[in-house]
Amino acid sequence: MKSKATGIQYRGGDVYDLEIRVQKDAAGKIMSGFVVGPTIEQNMACLLIAEPGDYKFDFGLGVGLRSALLDEDLLKYRHAIKQHFAQDGLNVRHLELYNLETFSINAEYE
């Protein structure tokens, strides 16, 4: 099984578009363009941001952490993070979400 820890990178910031750096040979042909690197942080961010139903091939995947801003029950979000990360193959080693001011996750692919 291939590891999800390495893959195509997204551009930083609010726009989750692909990071592309076009490299051409002497004749002007494109030799490469996609930037490949570690993906754990961006995969965790995508899972946290996504609402259930956002992923076409797995409608239940997505924590929907934006909704936590309007909710007082952070326990259900801690459970959702562990559940959805496990669905993606991420093993949560540490999760701190007891208020919306301090939030940290340490996870890695199995």
Image: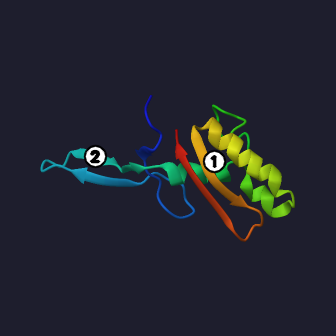
The outermost residue toward the right is 72
Q: Is residue 11 left or right of residue 87?
A: left
Front one among 60 and 4: 4
Where residue 2 sits, quadrant-wise, is top left
Tag 1 near tag 2, CB within 8 Å: no
| Secondary structure type for disc 1 | helix
Amino acid type shown at disc 1:
Leu
Q: In the rendering, at what x and y percent does residue 85 appear?
A: 63, 43
| Residue 61 at x, y percent in the picture | 68, 39
Q: Is residue 26 above or below residue 103?
A: above
Q: Neighbour class for label 2 at 10 Å: few (<14), some, many (≥20)?
A: few
* Image location (x, y in percent) of residue 105: 62, 57
Q: Which residue is mark 1?
A: 47
The amino acid type of the residue labelled 2 equals Ser
* Number of residues whose C-alpha sits closer than 10 Å to that of mark 1, classed few (under 14), some (14–19) or many (20 or more): many
Question: Element under label 2?
Answer: strand
Q: Residue at x 77, y 66 (%)?
A: 99
Residue carrying label 2: 32
Q: Is residue 67 above or below residue 60?
A: below
**Marks 1 and 2, how far apart in space?**
28 Å
